[in-house]
Amino acid sequence: MATSNNNMLLNYVPVYVMLPLGVVSVDNVFEDPDGLKEQLLQLRAAGVDGVMVDVWWGIIEQKGPKQYDWSAYRTLFQLIQECGLKLQAIMSFHQCGGNVGDVVNIPIPQWVLDIGESDSDIFYTNRSGTRNKEYLTIGVDNKPIFHGRTAIEVYSDCMKSFRENMSDAYSEPEELVQQVLSGGWREHIEVAGENALSRYDATAYNQIILNARPQGVNKNGPPKLWMYGVTYLRLSDDLMEQSNFDIFKKFVVKMHADQDYCADPEKYNHAIPPLKRSGPKIPNEVLLEAAKPIPPFPWESETDMKIDG
Protein backbone atom coordinates (compact mmCIF):
# COMPACT_ATOMS: atom_id res chain seq x y z
CA MET A 1 0.00 0.00 0.00
CA ALA A 2 1.44 3.37 -1.00
CA THR A 3 2.03 6.00 1.66
CA SER A 4 3.64 9.43 1.93
CA ASN A 5 6.86 9.97 3.85
CA ASN A 6 9.21 12.89 3.23
CA ASN A 7 12.39 10.82 3.47
CA MET A 8 11.04 7.99 1.34
CA LEU A 9 9.84 10.50 -1.24
CA LEU A 10 13.52 11.20 -1.95
CA ASN A 11 13.67 7.67 -3.41
CA TYR A 12 10.72 8.38 -5.74
CA VAL A 13 11.39 7.64 -9.43
CA PRO A 14 8.70 9.16 -11.69
CA VAL A 15 7.12 6.89 -14.33
CA TYR A 16 6.09 8.06 -17.79
CA VAL A 17 4.28 5.99 -20.44
CA MET A 18 5.04 6.43 -24.14
CA LEU A 19 1.93 7.13 -26.22
CA PRO A 20 1.33 5.24 -29.49
CA LEU A 21 3.46 6.51 -32.39
CA GLY A 22 0.39 7.40 -34.44
CA VAL A 23 -1.65 9.11 -31.71
CA VAL A 24 -1.62 12.03 -34.17
CA SER A 25 -2.06 10.62 -37.69
CA VAL A 26 0.15 11.34 -40.70
CA ASP A 27 -2.67 13.63 -41.87
CA ASN A 28 -2.31 15.66 -38.64
CA VAL A 29 -5.50 14.41 -37.01
CA PHE A 30 -5.95 13.47 -33.35
CA GLU A 31 -8.19 10.55 -34.21
CA ASP A 32 -9.45 9.01 -30.94
CA PRO A 33 -9.54 11.60 -28.13
CA ASP A 34 -12.32 9.80 -26.24
CA GLY A 35 -10.54 6.45 -26.27
CA LEU A 36 -7.23 8.00 -25.26
CA LYS A 37 -8.87 10.02 -22.48
CA GLU A 38 -10.21 6.82 -20.95
CA GLN A 39 -6.73 5.29 -20.99
CA LEU A 40 -5.06 8.44 -19.65
CA LEU A 41 -7.46 8.58 -16.71
CA GLN A 42 -6.64 4.95 -15.94
CA LEU A 43 -2.93 5.80 -15.98
CA ARG A 44 -3.52 8.76 -13.65
CA ALA A 45 -5.55 6.56 -11.30
CA ALA A 46 -2.66 4.07 -11.28
CA GLY A 47 -0.32 6.81 -10.06
CA VAL A 48 1.58 7.25 -13.33
CA ASP A 49 3.33 10.63 -13.41
CA GLY A 50 3.03 11.49 -17.08
CA VAL A 51 3.29 10.48 -20.71
CA MET A 52 5.83 10.87 -23.50
CA VAL A 53 4.86 11.63 -27.09
CA ASP A 54 6.81 12.08 -30.33
CA VAL A 55 6.15 15.36 -32.14
CA TRP A 56 6.81 14.43 -35.76
CA TRP A 57 8.46 16.98 -38.07
CA GLY A 58 6.82 15.21 -41.00
CA ILE A 59 3.40 16.10 -39.58
CA ILE A 60 3.70 19.63 -38.30
CA GLU A 61 5.74 21.15 -41.20
CA GLN A 62 4.46 18.97 -44.01
CA LYS A 63 2.75 21.76 -45.98
CA GLY A 64 5.93 23.72 -46.67
CA PRO A 65 8.86 25.61 -45.10
CA LYS A 66 7.77 27.35 -41.88
CA GLN A 67 4.14 26.36 -42.48
CA TYR A 68 3.54 24.83 -39.05
CA ASP A 69 0.26 23.29 -37.94
CA TRP A 70 0.18 22.47 -34.22
CA SER A 71 -3.61 22.12 -33.92
CA ALA A 72 -3.77 18.34 -33.37
CA TYR A 73 -0.88 18.34 -30.91
CA ARG A 74 -2.39 21.28 -29.00
CA THR A 75 -5.62 19.32 -28.58
CA LEU A 76 -3.66 16.26 -27.45
CA PHE A 77 -1.55 18.21 -24.96
CA GLN A 78 -4.60 19.93 -23.50
CA LEU A 79 -6.24 16.53 -22.97
CA ILE A 80 -3.11 15.24 -21.22
CA GLN A 81 -3.15 18.31 -18.97
CA GLU A 82 -6.87 17.85 -18.21
CA CYS A 83 -6.17 14.28 -17.15
CA GLY A 84 -3.63 15.50 -14.58
CA LEU A 85 -0.56 14.01 -16.27
CA LYS A 86 2.82 15.58 -16.96
CA LEU A 87 4.16 15.64 -20.52
CA GLN A 88 7.45 14.82 -22.21
CA ALA A 89 7.36 16.06 -25.82
CA ILE A 90 10.10 14.60 -28.04
CA MET A 91 10.89 16.65 -31.15
CA SER A 92 11.38 13.91 -33.75
CA PHE A 93 13.14 15.07 -36.92
CA HIS A 94 13.34 11.61 -38.44
CA GLN A 95 10.99 9.28 -40.26
CA CYS A 96 8.62 7.16 -38.21
CA GLY A 97 8.45 3.54 -39.26
CA GLY A 98 10.73 0.64 -40.06
CA ASN A 99 11.51 -0.43 -36.49
CA VAL A 100 10.40 -3.57 -34.66
CA GLY A 101 6.77 -3.22 -33.65
CA ASP A 102 6.16 -0.03 -35.64
CA VAL A 103 2.93 -0.03 -37.68
CA VAL A 104 2.93 3.71 -38.39
CA ASN A 105 4.71 5.38 -41.31
CA ILE A 106 5.39 9.14 -41.13
CA PRO A 107 8.07 10.34 -43.59
CA ILE A 108 10.02 13.56 -43.18
CA PRO A 109 8.33 16.54 -44.93
CA GLN A 110 7.74 16.11 -48.67
CA TRP A 111 9.31 19.50 -49.47
CA VAL A 112 12.54 18.19 -47.88
CA LEU A 113 12.34 14.94 -49.84
CA ASP A 114 11.87 17.04 -52.99
CA ILE A 115 15.18 18.80 -52.30
CA GLY A 116 16.73 15.35 -51.98
CA GLU A 117 15.60 14.50 -55.51
CA SER A 118 18.01 17.10 -56.90
CA ASP A 119 20.64 16.83 -54.14
CA SER A 120 20.63 13.27 -52.80
CA ASP A 121 23.72 13.98 -50.68
CA ILE A 122 21.44 15.47 -48.03
CA PHE A 123 20.84 11.83 -47.01
CA TYR A 124 23.23 9.32 -45.49
CA THR A 125 24.56 6.89 -48.10
CA ASN A 126 26.10 3.43 -47.69
CA ARG A 127 28.94 1.98 -49.76
CA SER A 128 26.56 0.51 -52.31
CA GLY A 129 25.01 3.93 -52.91
CA THR A 130 21.71 3.36 -51.09
CA ARG A 131 20.29 6.59 -49.71
CA ASN A 132 18.66 6.59 -46.26
CA LYS A 133 15.76 9.03 -46.43
CA GLU A 134 14.78 8.61 -42.78
CA TYR A 135 16.70 11.75 -41.73
CA LEU A 136 19.21 14.34 -42.90
CA THR A 137 22.95 13.83 -42.73
CA ILE A 138 24.96 16.04 -40.39
CA GLY A 139 26.84 17.12 -43.52
CA VAL A 140 24.05 19.62 -44.26
CA ASP A 141 23.79 21.01 -40.74
CA ASN A 142 25.32 24.31 -41.86
CA LYS A 143 24.42 24.41 -45.57
CA PRO A 144 21.61 26.87 -46.47
CA ILE A 145 20.01 24.60 -49.07
CA PHE A 146 16.57 24.27 -47.47
CA HIS A 147 14.93 27.32 -49.05
CA GLY A 148 17.70 29.51 -47.66
CA ARG A 149 17.98 27.80 -44.29
CA THR A 150 20.49 25.32 -42.92
CA ALA A 151 19.30 22.06 -41.37
CA ILE A 152 20.16 23.46 -37.92
CA GLU A 153 18.05 26.54 -38.65
CA VAL A 154 15.18 24.33 -39.84
CA TYR A 155 15.26 22.36 -36.58
CA SER A 156 15.67 25.51 -34.50
CA ASP A 157 12.79 27.32 -36.20
CA CYS A 158 10.52 24.33 -35.64
CA MET A 159 11.38 24.17 -31.93
CA LYS A 160 10.92 27.93 -31.56
CA SER A 161 7.48 27.63 -33.14
CA PHE A 162 6.68 24.77 -30.76
CA ARG A 163 7.67 26.86 -27.76
CA GLU A 164 5.66 29.86 -28.95
CA ASN A 165 2.55 27.81 -29.72
CA MET A 166 2.65 25.47 -26.73
CA SER A 167 3.63 27.83 -23.94
CA ASP A 168 0.20 27.38 -22.36
CA ALA A 169 -0.14 23.63 -22.97
CA TYR A 170 2.22 21.65 -20.84
CA SER A 171 10.15 14.60 -20.25
CA GLU A 172 25.23 -8.84 -22.25
CA PRO A 173 22.28 -6.19 -22.31
CA GLU A 174 22.13 -5.65 -18.54
CA GLU A 175 25.88 -5.19 -18.33
CA LEU A 176 25.60 -2.50 -21.02
CA VAL A 177 22.75 -0.83 -19.12
CA GLN A 178 24.83 -0.80 -15.94
CA GLN A 179 27.84 0.63 -17.75
CA VAL A 180 25.84 3.40 -19.43
CA LEU A 181 24.03 4.38 -16.21
CA SER A 182 27.24 4.29 -14.21
CA GLY A 183 29.01 6.50 -16.77
CA GLY A 184 26.27 9.08 -16.47
CA TRP A 185 26.24 9.00 -12.69
CA ARG A 186 30.03 9.40 -12.51
CA GLU A 187 29.68 12.61 -14.50
CA HIS A 188 26.80 13.74 -12.23
CA ILE A 189 24.33 13.50 -15.12
CA GLU A 190 20.67 13.08 -14.20
CA VAL A 191 20.08 9.86 -16.13
CA ALA A 192 16.65 8.82 -17.42
CA GLY A 193 15.65 5.94 -19.66
CA GLU A 194 12.97 3.70 -21.16
CA ASN A 195 12.39 0.00 -21.64
CA ALA A 196 13.36 -1.48 -25.01
CA LEU A 197 10.42 -3.88 -25.36
CA SER A 198 6.91 -4.00 -23.91
CA ARG A 199 6.59 -6.70 -21.24
CA TYR A 200 3.96 -7.19 -18.56
CA ASP A 201 5.56 -9.67 -16.12
CA ALA A 202 7.02 -9.19 -12.65
CA THR A 203 10.55 -10.22 -13.74
CA ALA A 204 10.75 -7.45 -16.32
CA TYR A 205 9.29 -4.82 -14.00
CA ASN A 206 11.60 -5.83 -11.16
CA GLN A 207 14.61 -5.39 -13.46
CA ILE A 208 13.48 -1.86 -14.35
CA ILE A 209 13.06 -1.04 -10.65
CA LEU A 210 16.52 -2.45 -9.90
CA ASN A 211 18.10 -0.34 -12.65
CA ALA A 212 16.25 2.73 -11.37
CA ARG A 213 17.71 2.25 -7.85
CA PRO A 214 20.55 -0.29 -8.19
CA GLN A 215 21.54 -0.08 -4.53
CA GLY A 216 18.01 0.05 -3.16
CA VAL A 217 16.00 2.72 -1.38
CA ASN A 218 17.36 4.91 1.39
CA LYS A 219 14.72 5.37 4.10
CA ASN A 220 16.55 8.43 5.45
CA GLY A 221 16.95 10.44 2.25
CA PRO A 222 17.77 10.17 -1.45
CA PRO A 223 19.52 7.01 -2.66
CA LYS A 224 23.13 7.31 -3.75
CA LEU A 225 22.27 6.08 -7.23
CA TRP A 226 18.91 6.53 -8.93
CA MET A 227 17.41 7.27 -12.30
CA TYR A 228 15.87 10.69 -12.81
CA GLY A 229 12.85 9.18 -14.53
CA VAL A 230 11.64 6.18 -16.50
CA THR A 231 9.38 6.25 -19.56
CA TYR A 232 7.42 3.05 -20.08
CA LEU A 233 7.15 1.98 -23.72
CA ARG A 234 4.26 2.08 -24.57
CA LEU A 235 0.53 2.73 -24.10
CA SER A 236 -1.42 -0.02 -25.90
CA ASP A 237 -4.50 -2.19 -25.64
CA ASP A 238 -2.25 -4.96 -24.29
CA LEU A 239 -1.06 -2.75 -21.43
CA MET A 240 -4.62 -1.73 -20.57
CA GLU A 241 -5.82 -5.38 -20.47
CA GLN A 242 -6.96 -5.83 -16.85
CA SER A 243 -4.41 -8.38 -15.59
CA ASN A 244 -1.53 -6.56 -17.29
CA PHE A 245 -2.66 -3.19 -15.98
CA ASP A 246 -3.05 -4.53 -12.44
CA ILE A 247 0.60 -5.57 -12.34
CA PHE A 248 1.62 -2.31 -14.04
CA LYS A 249 -0.04 -0.37 -11.21
CA LYS A 250 2.06 -2.32 -8.70
CA PHE A 251 5.16 -1.42 -10.71
CA VAL A 252 4.29 2.29 -10.55
CA VAL A 253 3.84 2.13 -6.75
CA LYS A 254 7.24 0.43 -6.32
CA MET A 255 8.94 2.96 -8.60
CA HIS A 256 7.46 5.59 -6.31
CA ALA A 257 9.07 3.79 -3.33
CA ASP A 258 5.65 2.79 -1.91
CA GLN A 259 4.62 6.45 -1.80
CA ASP A 260 1.38 8.00 -3.03
CA TYR A 261 1.51 9.93 -6.29
CA CYS A 262 3.34 13.24 -5.69
CA ALA A 263 2.38 16.20 -7.90
CA ASP A 264 5.26 18.42 -6.74
CA PRO A 265 8.62 17.43 -8.36
CA GLU A 266 10.54 19.58 -5.85
CA LYS A 267 9.54 17.19 -3.08
CA TYR A 268 11.50 14.42 -4.75
CA ASN A 269 14.28 16.74 -5.89
CA HIS A 270 13.20 16.89 -9.53
CA ALA A 271 12.80 20.60 -10.16
CA ILE A 272 13.70 21.25 -13.81
CA PRO A 273 15.69 24.46 -14.49
CA PRO A 274 16.00 25.98 -18.00
CA LEU A 275 18.64 24.41 -20.25
CA LYS A 276 21.98 26.19 -20.40
CA ARG A 277 23.69 27.11 -23.66
CA SER A 278 26.15 24.60 -25.10
CA GLY A 279 29.76 24.93 -24.01
CA PRO A 280 32.75 25.27 -26.34
CA LYS A 281 33.73 22.49 -28.74
CA ILE A 282 35.46 19.53 -27.12
CA PRO A 283 38.55 18.11 -28.91
CA ASN A 284 38.08 14.61 -30.37
CA GLU A 285 40.86 13.14 -28.26
CA VAL A 286 39.11 14.32 -25.10
CA LEU A 287 35.84 12.75 -26.29
CA LEU A 288 37.57 9.46 -27.13
CA GLU A 289 39.22 9.35 -23.71
CA ALA A 290 35.91 10.06 -22.00
CA ALA A 291 34.19 7.33 -24.05
CA LYS A 292 36.51 4.52 -22.93
CA PRO A 293 34.66 1.65 -21.19
CA ILE A 294 34.53 1.90 -17.40
CA PRO A 295 33.37 -0.63 -14.80
CA PRO A 296 29.81 -0.05 -13.51
CA PHE A 297 28.89 0.76 -9.94
CA PRO A 298 27.91 -2.24 -7.78
CA TRP A 299 24.37 -3.52 -8.47
CA GLU A 300 22.33 -5.48 -5.93
CA SER A 301 21.38 -8.95 -7.16
CA GLU A 302 17.69 -7.99 -7.08
CA THR A 303 15.56 -4.95 -6.25
CA ASP A 304 14.32 -4.34 -2.70
CA MET A 305 11.03 -3.07 -4.14
CA LYS A 306 9.83 -6.23 -5.94
CA ILE A 307 6.28 -6.09 -7.17
CA ASP A 308 5.75 -9.80 -6.44
CA GLY A 309 6.97 -9.79 -2.86
Image (cartoon, rainbow, N blue to C red):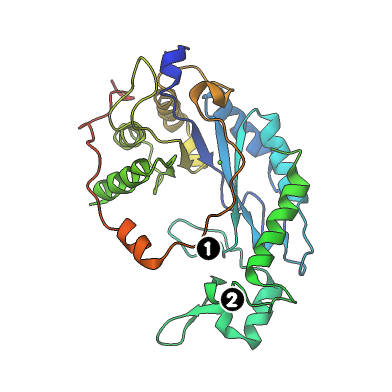
Q: Amino acid at mark 1?
A: Gly
250 up-or-down from 274: above or below? above
Secondary structure of residue under mark 2: helix
How packed mark 2 is, by other alpha carbons closer than 10 Å (few <14, some 14-19, many 20 or more), is some
- On screen, residue 94 above or below 222: below
The residue where tag 2 is placed is 140
Q: Amino acid at mark 2?
A: Val
Q: Where's residue 119, x and y in %?
A: 62, 86
All told, the count of numbered labels is 2
Q: Which mark is residue 83?
A: none
Residue 272 location, quadrant: top right
Instruction: Please determine whether, in this image, residue 283 is positioned above or below residue 51.
Output: below
User: Residue 71's x, y, as percent?
Assistant: 78, 50
Image quadrant occupied by the N terminus: top left
Depth check: give the residue in front, 98 or 61. Answer: 61
At a point 68% along the width and 55% down the height, the residue shown is 159
2 w.r.t. 297: above or below: above
- Residue 286, quarter of picture: bottom left
Query: For numbered disc 1, what is the local secondary structure?
Result: loop
Q: Is residue 106 left or right of residue 252?
A: right
* Of the image marks 1 and 2, the number of the one nearer the N terminus: 1
Q: Which residue is mark 1?
A: 97
Q: Is residue 238 visible?
A: yes
Relative placement, left or right, of 191 versus 97 is: left
Q: Residues within 10 Å of mark 1 (few under 14, many from 20)?
A: some
Front-most of residues 113 and 142 = 142
